[in-house]
Amino acid sequence: MNGEDLILVREDNYTATAPQLSMTLEGTPTSVPGSTTIVYANQKTAGPKIYGALAIMLGSLGALMQFFGFLDAGNQAELWGASDNPLRFWLFIFPIIGFASSVVFVYAGTLLFNYKRRGVWMGFGAVGVNALGNALHSFVIGMIVDGATEGTGVEGVGGLFAGAGIFVTALSVVCCGLIVALPLLTNGNDLED
């Protein structure tokens, strides 16, 4: 019989019979018969990698700037009129503090890049040390400028410099703190201990 000779006829009362098979299963079922178990693979998001790379770049840039700031500390003392000021030593100490916090920020970025939760806390520590150093630097620069302008008739310029420095420090803390906090807030489940 070939396909051209095949004719199907349907009648209203069609019944089909099939032989009944009897089967016995032994053991305990592992799942409900007829159900499907779905296993989801936990894929990590790219958020911590992106924020980690950003922290590495910003920390590296900060470390480079602080290194050159240390090399230029003597010229900065002359610029601020602090050549004979007893607070001159701070212009050499501040870049060392900034360099150390930038290196820690780079390390925190590396940990974030590798999905380590510890990178968030180290990043917060680096931001805190940097904020403290910048706040002290703003205060010392204000005192140096007040000492340099004493007797010139210009009063309160040091306070203006200190206030501007505190404002920039607060802005920096918010930005760097967000870079560190966002991986924990948005992708906290992806970070490992």
Image (cartoon, rainbow, N blue to C red):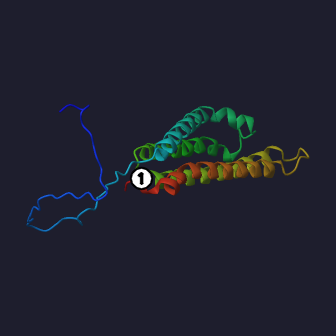
* Label 1 element class: helix
Q: Nearer the viewer, residue 63 or 192?
A: 192
Residue 122 at least partly seen: yes
- Amino acid bearing label 1: Asp
Query: Where does the image place residue 169, in percent across and percent down from the top left?
Result: 67, 50
Query: Where does the image place residue 32, in percent across and percent down from the top left?
Result: 24, 66
Drawn side of residue 43 relative to residue 171, left or right: left
For the point 34% across and 53% down, the residue is: 40
Please say if 188 is above or below 25.
Answer: above
Q: Nearer the viewer, residue 100 or 143?
A: 100
Crowding near pointer 1: few (<14 within 10 Å), some, many (20+)? Answer: some
Residue 104 at least partly seen: no
Please identify the quadrant where the N terminus is shown: top left
For the point 71% across and 52% down, the residue is: 166
Query: Where does the image place residue 34, in percent across and percent down from the top left?
Result: 26, 62
Query: Where does the image place residue 191, in percent across and percent down from the top left?
Result: 41, 53
Q: Nearer the viewer, residue 42 or 162?
A: 42
For the point 87% across and 50% down, the residue is: 155
Please identify the quadrant where the C terminus is shown: bottom left
Please say if 104 is above or below 34.
Answer: above
Drawn side of residue 147 relative to residue 130, left or right: right
Q: Nearer the viewer, residue 59 or 80?
A: 59
Q: How many marks?
A: 1
Drawn side of residue 125 relative to residue 175, left or right: left
For the point 49% across and 39% down, the residue is: 53
Q: Which residue is mark 1?
A: 190
Instruction: Spot the residue most to the right.
Output: 153
